[in-house]
């Protein structure tokens, strides 16, 4: 069983030691064995006006958004309640009345 630390950049378990350095073969990241582990910071989600968003907030859509695979669109001014923030290409998971479950980008909403 290896006691080498995981890569701090990509969390790969397949690291190896080369002198005083640890090396990750997957992302080619090199770091010192004496280095202090970085403090993990959580991502800050902001709306179009720069306000910080949190889980459970209510937001308003700022422009008409066409839906893929549907003839409809989410109209500007639509209120979305109880959002959930996720770490993916679309930052917000929510349910919109009349449309159902949907993912939105934070750049197209404004906090109410």
Image (cartoon, rainbow, N blue to C red):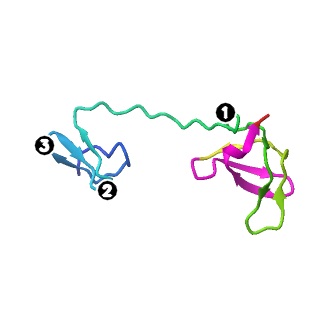
Label 3, label 1: how many angstroms apart (C-alpha)?
Answer: 46 Å
Q: Could you tell me residue 38's position as x and y percent? A: 37, 33
Q: Earlier in the sequence, mark 3 or mark 1?
A: 3
Residue on which the image places disc 2? 26
Camera-side residue: 65 or 97?
A: 65
Residue to which mark 3 is pinned: 19
Q: Which residues are magenta?
A: 87-110
x and y percentages locating residue 89 in the rendered image: 59, 53
Specify whether 73 is left or right of 106. Answer: right
Do the CB atoms of the residues marked 3 and 1 lie less than 8 Å apart? no
Decide which of tag 1 and tag 2 comes sooner along the chain: 2
**Magenta-drawn stretch contains 91:** yes
Residue 99 included in the magenta stretch of the image = yes
Element assignment for label 2: loop
**Which mark, by number, is residue 96?**
none
In which quarter of the view is residue 65 placed? Answer: bottom right
Question: In this rendering, which labeled residue sits more in front, label 3 or label 1?
Answer: 1
Which residue is painted at 63% across and 47% down in the image? 91
The answer to whether the residue labelled 1 contacts the one labelled 2, judged by CB atoms less than 8 Å apart, is no
Q: Left or right: where does residue 83 sit relative to residue 42?
A: right
87 over 40 or under it: above or below: below
Residue matched to label 1 = 50
- Position of 28 compared to 17: left or right? right
Circle 3 crowding by C-alpha within 10 Å: few under 14, some 14–19, many from 20: few
């Amino acid at each position: 069983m290896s006691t080498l630390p995981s890569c701090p950049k990509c969390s790969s378990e397949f690291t190896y030691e080369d002198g005083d350095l640890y090396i990750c073969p997957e992302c080619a990241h090199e770091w010192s064995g004496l280095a202090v582990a970085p403090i993990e910071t959580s991502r800050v989600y902001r709306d179009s006006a720069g306000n910080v968003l949190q889980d459970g907030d209510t937001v308003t859509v700022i422009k008409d958004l066409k839906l893929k695979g549907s003839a409809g669109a989410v109209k500007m001014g639509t209120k979305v309640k109880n959002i959930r923030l996720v770490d993916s290409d679309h930052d917000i998971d929510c349910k919109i009345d009349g449309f159902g479950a949907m993912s939105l980008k934070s750049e197209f909403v404004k906090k109410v």
